[in-house]
Image (cartoon, helix red, strand yellow):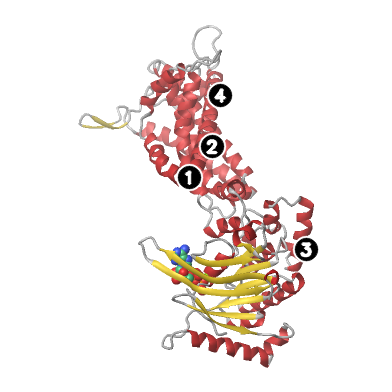
Amino acid sequence: MSATRAAVTISGVDKVFRTRKGGEVHALSDVSLEVAAGEFVSLIGPSGCGKSTLMRLVADLDPVTSGTIEVFGKSVEQARKDQDYGIAFQQAGLLPWRTVRANIELPLEIHGVEARARRERSDELLALIGLEDFADHHPDQLSGGMKQRVAIARSMAERPRLLLMDEPFGALDEMTREHMQNELVALCQETGAAVIFVTHSIPEAVFLSDRVVVMSPRPGRITDVIDLSFSSRDEELREDAAFYEGVTAVRSALHGGADASSGPRGVENR
Amino acid sequence: MRTARAQATLWSVVGVLGVAALWELYKAIAPDDGVTVGTVTVLPRTTDIAMPHIWDMVTRLFEPVTRAAGADVLWWAVLQAAAFSLGIAVLGWVLGVVSGMLLALLMQRWITAESAVLPWVVLSQTVPLIAIAPLVKRWGTAIHLGPFQWENWMSVAVIASYLAFFPVAVSALRGLKSPPQADTDLFHAYAAGWWTTLVRLRLPASVPYLMPALKLAAANAVVGTVVAEVSIGLGGGIGRMIIEFAATASGDPAKTWAPILGAVLIGLLSAGLVALLGRGLGRFRRGEVPA
Ligand SMILES: Nc1ncnc2c1ncn2[C@@H]1O[C@H](COP(=O)(O)OP(=O)(O)OP(=O)(O)O)[C@@H](O)[C@H]1O
Ligand SMILES: [Mg+2]
């Protein structure tokens, strides 16, 4: 694959946190991964295996200890400054004093997009997430799922070619979650963005991803990469035999990668 | 909303009437010489000199200040003095809020500034007002800038601001540091600089912390003004009026209470002004627990 086609190229990355007492936490060890443009990649693994850390490195929120990460052929810092990615965290993180619309427009506002263009874009996104009627509401008037949808719309406001999402559906109930997954699939097909998606749920990873990256802790590393090439992602896929094969494949990869005695923790099998 | 506000007004009226009723009740039932244990008076005297009747105080307001011909009616004199003091207090409050905010920004921007400045901010409040009043006056009069002349009212405003800046500096610092890491990370991801992060994140987030501090600063500015007027020797305000009228207490007891009413009036007005400001900032105060 040529370098220009890759959205993210991670090569030989190590991340060591130094704690205050002088201890060291080896959060990531020799991690290499390439995410193609438009590709959907999920990171899955037990708690503490470094999924969030890896995502933060790509977003240039923390520096790597060694190794390199390129985003669209640029350094992570340059990519951040060029606004090449959109990001959504586990907590929606909406600003309480801004309306839903103003929250979605925040990145546009910060980057000096003029009011009319901002308004057009937020109208589009509000329609996309089905919250047109809530444009002038404040976050405290929304349910958890609605807030999450706003956060996702905000991450897409600048039409990034890369989306970084850290357990964005973690706080949602199963029904809302499946609904949001369908929406995310639709959104990605529409925008053609590459996605790095952190999750604890095996079915979620299988349903959404082109590839599932399985990680294991102490030190955090990639133990397996599972290719899933479903022809289409719709409600029927959830009942499909190929889907269950995918789930089984990811689950056995997770079990194989962890200590035989303890088994993976923090991973939901639902 | 409307009924809640009507209720609040009702209760404040009840509160004022209650105090007046207590005053008269105590005056009626307690002995004239108060209650003494040995030689120590534990409850105040209730003579008309120590505790004039409420209605005497009110009627006194509508009589002239002195018997001299052409003297103003008392309530008008008190009102003028109150307006004079309120003006200085507002100026002191503005100075205090601005310097408190600037200090907080400095401390938020540079960690070292926080460890260097914060102890002094705290320490500054342990210096008694009486001690700084002559200093401020002396330093002020040492300033010579062309036609500029340091006036006594400026010293009073500076002292008022000295009392007002403290709660603002401390609470604003807490407010500016209040956004969670997820929020600051988000702004970092947007490649937003310090200024953008300040204006769009830190300042709005600090409003709920700032509101009680602004109220406290207003109360401090009023007290600072009244006391500093006395220490500096500035005439025309409530502070000097309290002292002057107290000198005539034995002959005209009801009169001494008039400037105290004026001081209460300033306090109420300044609290009202801050509350008005708080209403204007309402949209940043979502989720704030009503204090
Ligand atoms: N700022 C930090 N300082 C020190 N150690 C850290 C820091 N951030 C993460 N770690 C450590 O790095 C390791 C990986 O953490 P990370 O948050 O990436 O895990 P995760 O896979 O996202 O877990 P979870 O599924 O629970 O979110 C953990 O052992 C954690 O304690
Ligand atoms: Mg995590």
Q: Are marks 1 and 3 on the same chain?
A: no
Q: Are marks 4 and 2 on the same chain?
A: yes
Query: Can residue B258 be seen in the rendering of this structure?
Result: no
A86 sits left or right of A200 in the view: right
Quarter of the rendering containing residue B226: top left
Residue for point 54% across, 19% down? B62
> Mark 3 = which residue?
A124
Q: Amino acid at mark 2?
A: Ala
Percent x, y of residue B68: 50, 7
**How far is the residue under mark 1 from the one under mark 4?**
40 Å
> Mark 1 = which residue?
B110
* Disc 1 versus disc 3: nearer the observer: 1
Q: Are marks 4 and 3 in contact (CB under 8 Å)?
A: no
> Mark 2 = which residue?
B271
The furthest residue to the top: B69
* Disc 2 versus disc 1: nearer the observer: 1
Q: Amino acid at mark 1?
A: Trp
> Mark 4 = which residue?
B83
B291 sits left or right of A24 in the view: right
Residue B50 marker: none
Percent x, y of residue A74: 64, 62
Q: Amino acid at mark 3?
A: Glu
**How far is the residue under mark 4 from the one under mark 3?**
55 Å
Q: Chain of mark 1?
A: B
Q: Residues within 10 Å of mark 4 (few under 14, many from 20)?
A: some
First of labels 4, 2 by sequence position: 4
Q: Residues within 10 Å of mark 3 (few under 14, many from 20)?
A: some
Q: Are marks 2 and 1 on the same chain?
A: yes
Q: Residues within 10 Å of mark 2 (few under 14, many from 20)?
A: some
Asked if A105 appears above or below A13 in the picture, the reply is above
Q: Chain of mark 4?
A: B
Asked if A115 appears above or below A199 in the picture, the reply is above
